[in-house]
Amino acid sequence: MKVNPEYRSKEALLALYNTPLLELVYQAATIHREYHNPREVQMSSLLSIKTGGCPEDCGYCPQAARYQTDVDVHKLMSVESVIEQAKNAKSNGSSRLCMGAAWREVRDNRDFDKVVEMVQAVNDLDMEVCCTLGMMSEDQALRLKKAGLFAYNHNLDSSKEFYKDVISTREYEDRLKTIDNARKAGISVCSGGIIGMGEAVEDRIGLLLSYMEMETPPESIPINALVAVEGTPLEEQKPIEQWEMIRMVATTRIAFPESVVRLSAGRTKMSMEAQAMCFMAGAGSIFAGDKLLTTPNPEFNEDQEMFHILGLEPKEAFADGEKPVTEPDPILEAKKEKEAMARKDFEPRKVSVV
Ligand code: SAM
Ligand code: DTB
Ligand code: SF4
C-alpha cells in the first residue's frame, strides 16, 4: 500500500489532521509498526556544496541573493573536501549524505561534472547519496542516476495555492516536472514541505494531496518547520507549536504508510519529548550534524543522547533499496583521457648530457 486510499480526499485528510492528538499519534504509531521497524531512525547528513547567491526568491530561504542575510556565498566545494566531509559524517553514524546547492537549476557545465564526480565518490563510500540541486531535466537525472545517485530531494513546500505567496520565480508545475524527471530516471524521490510559513492547515493538507495525486508518491517525505532567518521575507513568522509538527508527521505517516517521514528543519526549537512524540508518530529519519545547510541543527552529542534515552538505533544504508551501481560517465572519461594525453605531451624529454 503506497498510499492509504482512505485519505485521497481533502475532507478525509483534514479530518485526519484534526483527530484528537493522542488518538492521531496512536493510529500513526500503529501504522508505523506495521510497515517499519520503529526502533530504527535514519541519520542523514546535509552538506551545502554550493552556498548562497541563488537567483530564486523563495521567501523562506537565506540563500537567495536578493535578501540581506548572514550567509556567505561559497562557490562549489572541491570533490576532495566533499569526500572528507562524507567520511566524517559516516564515522558519526550517518548512512545518507544529502548534498545541496543553491542553484535554480542544474546546468550542463563543469560544476555539474564535479557534482557527478562527488556522487560517484560518495556512493563508493557505501553511503546513500542524495542531491538537491534545483530543477533538472530527465537527461541530467539519468546522468546522476548512472553516477550512483540514490535519491533526489525537491520539495513542493506547500499547497499549490499558497506556493505563489512564497515564491514567484518558478511555478509549482516546474517542481512537479523535476520530480517526474527524477522518477523516470529511476531515482528515489524525496519531497516534502515546510510548515510555519503563515499557511493555513488546508495548505498543509494541500501539500499532502499533491503527493496523493502522483502515480507513485515520494519514497521519502521531509517535514520542515520554518527556520525564520533574519533578512528573509519570513523573518517575522512566529514559531509553530510543537504539537503542529507532531500532527503533520502523524498525518503524513498514516496517509503514506510506506514512505519514510523525515523530521527535518526546526529541531533546535523542539524539546526531546516533542521529538519523541514525532518518532512515536512515525518519523523515521533526522538530519544529523551541527548544521543543516546554513542554519543550526542540534549538536551531535545531544542527538546521541536522545537516541540512547529513546532506545533508537541508526538505520543502515540501503535498507530500503539496493545500492546503485556506478557506471563510467562518458564526459568524465573523455576529460580524464584528454588530461592524460596532455600530460604525455608535456612529459620532459630525456636529454643526454655529454
Ligand atoms: N536550491 C534547491 C531547491 O530549492 O530545491 C536546493 C536547496 S533548498 C535550500 C532545499 C529545501 O530546503 C527547500 O526546498 C526548502 O524546503 C528547505 N528550506 C530552505 N530554507 C528553509 C528554511 N529557512 N526553513 C525550513 N526549510 C528551508
Ligand atoms: C529538506 O527538506 N530540508 C533540508 C533538505 N531537505 C535539503 C534543508 C533544510 C534547510 C534549512 C535552512 C538552511 O539550513 O539553510
Ligand atoms: Fe535558491 Fe533553493 Fe533557496 Fe530557493 S530554496 S532560494 S531555489 S537555494
Image: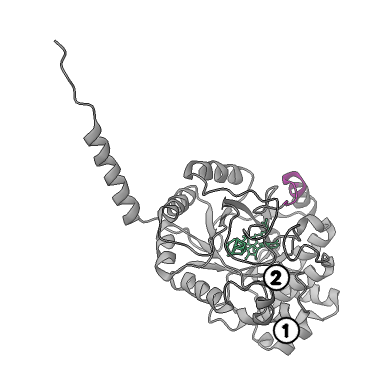
Q: Decide: few, some or many residues near mark 1? Use Cα within 10 Å; few <14, some 14-19, many ≥20.
A: many
Q: Which residue bears the numbered disc 1?
A: 13
* In the image, farthest residue toward the top: 354
Q: Earlier in the sequence, mark 2 or mark 1?
A: 1
Question: Does the stretch in magenta take in 245?
Answer: no
The answer to which quarter of the image holds residue 17 is bottom right
The answer to which quarter of the image holds residue 11 is bottom right
Question: Is 107 in front, or is 18?
Answer: 107
Q: Secondary structure at mark 1?
A: helix
The residue shown at (83%, 62%) is 274
Percent position of residue 197, x then y: 75, 70
Task: Residue 32: give its label.
Answer: 2
The residue shown at (39%, 67%) is 139
| Picture quarter with ligand 2 | bottom right
Question: Is 319 in front, or is 221?
Answer: 221
Residue type highlighted by circle 1 = Leu
What segment carries the magenta color? 296-304
Instruction: Give the foreground label among 2 and 1.
Output: 1
**Colour logic:** one colour
Percent position of residue 278, x then y: 77, 65
Q: Is residue 98 above or below residue 141?
A: above
